[in-house]
Image: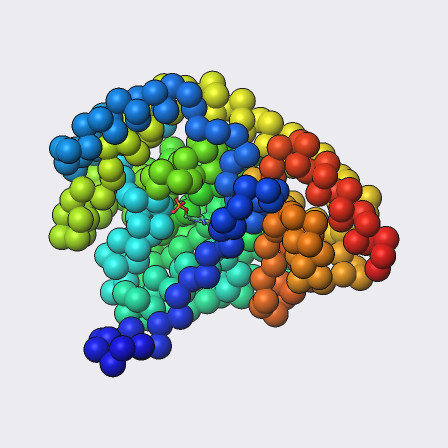
Amino acid sequence: MSGFLDDRYGSLLPYTPGEQPKTNDLIKLNTNESPFPPSQKAIEEAEKELRRSNLYPDPECVALREKFAEVLGNGLTKENIFVGNGSDEVLFFAFSAYKKRGIAFPDITYGFYPVYAQITGASYKEIPLGDDFSVDVDGLIEQKGTIVVANPNAPTGMVLAKSEIVRMLESDPSRVVIVDEAYVDFGGDSCVDLIGKYKNLLVTQTFSKSRSLAGARLGFGIADKEIVRDLNLLKYSFNPYNINRATLALGTGVLFDEEYTKKNCREVMSVREYTREELEKLGFTVLDSRANFLFAAHKSVTGKEVYEKLKNKKILVRYFDKDRLRPFVRITIGSKAQMEKMIEEIKNITEEA
Ligand code: PMP
């Protein structure tokens, strides 16, 4: 630290992103990206926009918001849609906006939540998951303030029933419930249809996973228009041009190619089930994932060992050096060919053990 740094950042523990290797010769299954390229239609739109990069992009992101509202249906309009530079940015604004009575989230979930709580100066409480990795809804409700849940959760991939989200929403209409639906398109049950009924619901989604745009950085807050106004207040006080021209065009373009997205999601789900069966045959316990990754533990090899041995074979997965997570590896679902290769290598690892 420089000594110039403001005191309140001195003890900040930043988020550790998954490794981003500089070479292309690895099978990359560590950051839950899509194995499929972005939609060709979207790329063509973005190329045109790159030529206009001398001009600022639309700060209101109107075309994108209108199209996304139409695709989401449920009577939503662009007034219900906030656009962020990745859903990470949306979550940061939401933590900043809704921290006055504290923030609660599960102890095993997306690693950015405690970081956002710290940087925004929120008081926060991490509520332990049950022994079966289920979310303790009553424990969250007992807290007074904002609740944040990822549904499906990360890194478990497990889903929380919509009725449980409703219970949180109804426990106190004066608290905001943030449902992070980064992985919802791989078999989850979205809460977007509840927005008309609950003014205290904020759903976040991303185009990084199901829509193959992780590198473009595009995320959304979907909520009652008052909540969208709050988020815009923060955005316009920070960076009105938070989405660049090419990304806006990619995002709008991919929404005109919904069949492509749906086909890719079906493929990921089918490859996920294949991978899960193969891992179970090799003695892994695999949690019931509805996301584009699996969280699996072997009886005789730790997560770190699997990670290291796979890395030697140029396959990158992720492990977490945290109490209950040590036996597990998190494996992003890649293409069928990538998963076959990964299974072959994991077979050698478990046989050695
Ligand atoms: N929420 C969860 C649960 C995630 O795993 C991620 C991806 N790391 C994000 C949000 C953020 O995704 P992005 O900023 O790419 O939209």
Task: Identify the image quadrant of residue 277.
Answer: top right
* 124 to the left or right of 99: right
Q: Is residue 214 visible?
A: yes
Quarter of the picture containing the N terminus is bottom left
Horizontal relation, residue 81 to residue 106: left or right: left
- Front in this rendered view, residue 174 or 332: 332
| Left or right for 128, reference 227 | right
- From the viewer's side, name the closer residue of 141 and 332: 332
Q: Decide if residue 101 is in sight here.
A: no
Task: Give the quadrant of residue 10.
Answer: bottom left
4 above or below 189?
A: below
Residue at point 44%, 28% (across, down): 38
In x, y percent, where is residue 254? Answer: 38, 25
Residue ID at (79%, 53%): 349
The colouring scheme, among rainbow, by chain, secondary structure or one colour, is rainbow
The C terminus is located in which quarter?
bottom right
From the top left corner, tell me how far across and down residue 324 is, in percent: 63, 66
Foreground pick, 205 / 47: 47
Residue under the point 76% across and 48% down: 346
- Depth check, front residue: 328 or 181: 328
* Residue shown at 14% from the left, 48% from the top: 236
On the image, the x and y values in percent for residue 312 come to: 69, 54
Q: Position of residue 78 (x, y in %)?
A: 23, 30
Count of marks overlaid on the render? 0
